[in-house]
Image (cartoon, helix red, strand yellow):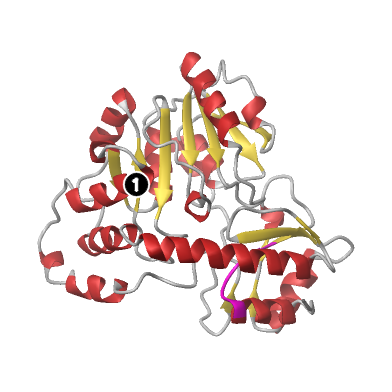
């Protein structure tokens, strides 16, 4: 990192509600975890008294099965953001230009800037049509956060080919792709994929994720990865959850049903974006975002002020949760389905 850039940087806002008495719709995490997760976590305590196997064979094998790649191509990380940082830190130098979607996850720009790079923002729905030449890296978030739509697979693969032809790294953040039936780009030459257990498996506090890469980029990530960077409980829980295909299928079905119901209800009052993700973005129109956020909170629900995302000035993002919890959200927003 560039020390001067670090001193000039700030933290970026995120969702997440620390008050347990407030129902949290500001963070896009599953309201469920796979059966047996608590028991796996508890059983890992005795093993945690010694250093973990730095090769993480069980975790890597489970992750590889999910994204259909070779286990050797999986690089364990403490969360998806750590995978994003690792990919950017091993490629971006001071002065390098990086294509970033907007609006999208603010940590991309922060990580680029910490390395001394220059973020070049492109509309999130136009980035795949951009010429990647003259850029060191391009970042795609699919489904995009906060807008919710997944990238068209054919357009994304064509963009990956163009990036490879211009020696432009492509970083694809697939934190929410497990909620869809689209195939991962893991194992595609020239592409680094970042994945997380935070969203789909409802485990933001475990801090487990991984990157997938090939060839020289894989070697870079493997070399730069910190030793023992995944705790024993995180590795054990991660492997357990990644193996639970039935849980993923059930989650996809429930989220799809509830997302459609929520969108229809919210659309009676707001302009709601289409979404492939476990969240919905809506424009509050004539209503103040501050008022909507405050009103929801007074009624026991936290929603995400989305004006912190680049280019959004009248928007709120809400997660998709269980049917009962979603009913509470609609009631808090004074919306009836």
Residue at the outermost left position: 50
Residue 303 against residue 187 in the figure, above or below: below
Is 331 colored magenta in this rendering?
A: no
Is 318 colored magenta in this rendering?
A: yes
Q: Which residues are magenta?
A: 317-323
Q: Could you tell me which residue is drawn at 25 percent across and 47 percent down?
A: 60
Residue at the outermost right position: 286
Where is the N terminus found, in terms of image quarters?
top left
Q: Could you tell me which residue is drawn at 41 percent across and 25 percent down?
A: 190
Whether residue 119 appears in this view of the structure is no
Residue 26 position in % (x across, y down) = 60, 67
Q: Is residue 222 left or right of residue 257?
A: left
Query: Is label 1 in a helix, a strand or a loop?
Result: strand
According to the picture, the residue beneath numbered tag 1 turns out to be 210
Of residues 208 and 63, which is closer to you in this image? 63
Q: Are there few (<14), some (14-19), or many (20+) residues within 10 Å of tag 1? A: many
Residue 109 position in % (x across, y down) = 55, 39
């Amino acid at each position: 990192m560039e020390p001067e850039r670090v001193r000039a940087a700030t933290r970026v806002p995120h969702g997440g509600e620390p008050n347990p008495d407030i129902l949290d719709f500001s963070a896009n995490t599953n309201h469920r975890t796979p059966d047996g997760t608590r028991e796996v976590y508890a059983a890992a305590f005795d093993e945690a008294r010694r250093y973990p196997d730095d090769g993480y064979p069980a975790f890597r094998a489970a992750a590889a099965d999910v994204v259909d790649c070779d286990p050797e191509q999986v690089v364990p990380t403490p969360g998806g953001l750590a995978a994003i940082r690792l990919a950017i830190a091993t490629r971006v130098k001071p002065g390098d230009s990086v294509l970033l979607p907007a609006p999208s996850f603010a940590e991309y720009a922060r990580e680029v800037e910490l390395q001394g790079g220059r973020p070049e923002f492109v509309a999130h729905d136009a980035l795949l049509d951009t010429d990647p030449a003259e850029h060191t890296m391009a970042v795609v978030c699919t489904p995009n956060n906060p807008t919710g739509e997944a990238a068209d697979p054919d357009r994304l693969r064509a963009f990956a080919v163009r990036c490879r032809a211009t020696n432009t790294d492509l970083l694809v953040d697939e934190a929410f792709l497990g909620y869809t039936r689209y195939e991962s780009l893991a194992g595609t030459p020239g592409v680094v994929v970042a994945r997380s257990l935070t969203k789909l498996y409802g485990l933001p506090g475990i801090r487990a994720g991984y990157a997938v890469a090939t060839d020289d980029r894989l070697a870079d990530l493997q070399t730069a990865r910190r030793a023992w960077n995944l705790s024993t409980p995180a590795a054990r829980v991660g492997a357990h959850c990644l193996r639970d295909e039935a849980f993923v299928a059930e989650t996809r079905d429930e989220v799809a049903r509830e997302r459609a119901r929520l969108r229809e209800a919210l659309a009676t009052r707001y302009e709601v974006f289409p979404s492939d993700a476990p969240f919905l973005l809506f424009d509050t129109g004539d209503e103040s975002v501050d008022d909507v956020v405050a009103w929801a909170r007074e009624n026991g629900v936290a929603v995400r002020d989305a004006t912190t995302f680049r280019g959004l000035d009248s928007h709120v993002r809400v997660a998709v949760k269980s049917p009962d919890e979603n009913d509470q959200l609609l009631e808090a927003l004074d919306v009836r389905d």
